[in-house]
Amino acid sequence: MERILIGDRCEILVSDGLPSPLLPPRRGHPPSRVVVLSQPGRVAEVAAAVADRIEQDDVSSGSPGVEVHTVGIPDRDEAKTLGVAEELYRHLDRLRVDRYDTIVGVGGGAATDLAGFVASTWLRGVETVYVPTTLLGAVDAAIGGKTGVNREGKNQIGTFRHPRRVVVSIDVLRSLPRGLLIEGMAETLKAGLIGDSRLAEILEEHGLESPLPEVVTRAVKVKAEVVAEDFFETGRRAILNYGHTIGHAVETAIGMPHGHAVAIGMVAAGAVSAEKAGYPHQLRQREMITALGLPVQSPPVDRSVIMELLGRDKKHRGGPLPKMVLLEDFGKPVVVDVSSRDVEIGLTAIGL
């Protein structure tokens, strides 16, 4: 089992199965209630196993007494609304959840985003544990302490608050449908491109057959190291947005899966990087993305729609366009101002 720390605020456990004890130790007052948030389908099976493990750990502790409650939430971004958050607040109120209790988010990135948002705003903060069930969640969404729900745009309402623990089960990730594995490879490759050239090489050499324990651990370490240095995204953390500027705009305009949008966004960013930062691996990066089964071309959408969405990007810092993360080389990201012409180079590269 690998244990990765983000300061003294969060630990990430990468293990074959669910570790025991699953919940982190609590100083002083142990939780009386644990609320497990579960999405439907295969995630519900993982959530049931999580609840069972917590109950078994409670019995083994010698002083049992924890109540474990499982609450269902919608799938994917249907979960990330203020309406769903309000429903959860009512559940927490009815169960008398207090600040000594724990909320466990089981599922993809939407589940952990919602769990973190609700936990950070209920009674000004309840401890959270995440059990991501997608590769995208394991290497990105569950790591870093960003929580949020969507309004007119993605994550317009949210907080910065670390979960106490993130449990990444390789067995769960190995059981993923091929499509979800492919989607998660976009954020995994991104981690390699911005911070671990060996990870990028492993993915280039082995594609979807890459050894999951190694690539997951490497990707998590990249993000954990960046977040530890810049939790509130006032500086270096912005490099984690490689592929996300144009990618998010395409995702919002078309409604495509996040990983696919990031892959397309990285193709666009690679083209701008080659033009503006001398990036020598534009074509090589494109081939990596293709080999992982990810798209490199955007479905049709009018350029004016993309430009309008870029103007409303939440990373906007004044001026007509947000800054963009480019690469000078593998592991050498830079955050720069871009012009409309630069963006057009990126859009041309993805077929727009």
Image (cartoon, rainbow, N blue to C red):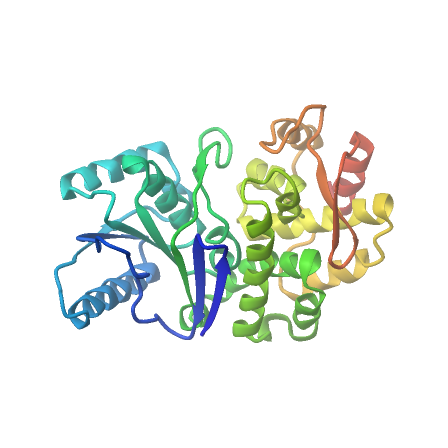
Q: Residue furthest top?
A: 319
Let me know if residue 297 appears in the view.
no
- Whether residue 315 is situated above or below residue 224 in the rendered picture: above
Residue at 32% across / 49% down in the picture? 127
Q: Splitting the image into 4 quarters, where does residue 158 fall?
A: top left
Residue drawn at 87 percent across, 50 percent down: 278
Residue 207 lies, in percent from the top left, at 64, 71
- Residue 160 visible in this rendered orientation of the protein: yes
Q: Nearer the viewer, residue 131 or 243?
A: 131
Q: Position of residue 251 (x, y in %)?
A: 57, 41
Observer-nearest of 134 and 120: 120
- The quadrant where residue 184 appears: bottom right
Relative horizontal placement of residue 237, taking residue 105 as reference (left or right): right
Name the quadrant containing residue 116: top left
As displayed, is residue 314 above or below residue 134? above
Specify the quadrant that holds the N terminus: bottom left
| Place of residue 35 in the rendered image (x, y in percent of width and height, measured from the top left) | 24, 51
Q: Going 38% across and 40% down the picture, which residue do you hit?
A: 117
Total marks placed = 0
Picture residue at 81% right of the left edge, 40% below the top:
345
Q: Is residue 173 above or below residue 332?
A: below
- When the figure is inspected, residue 39 is found, relative to residue 247, above or below; the finding is below
Q: How far from the left and from the top, in percent, is residue 185?
A: 58, 61
In which quadrant of the rendered image does the C terminus lie? top right
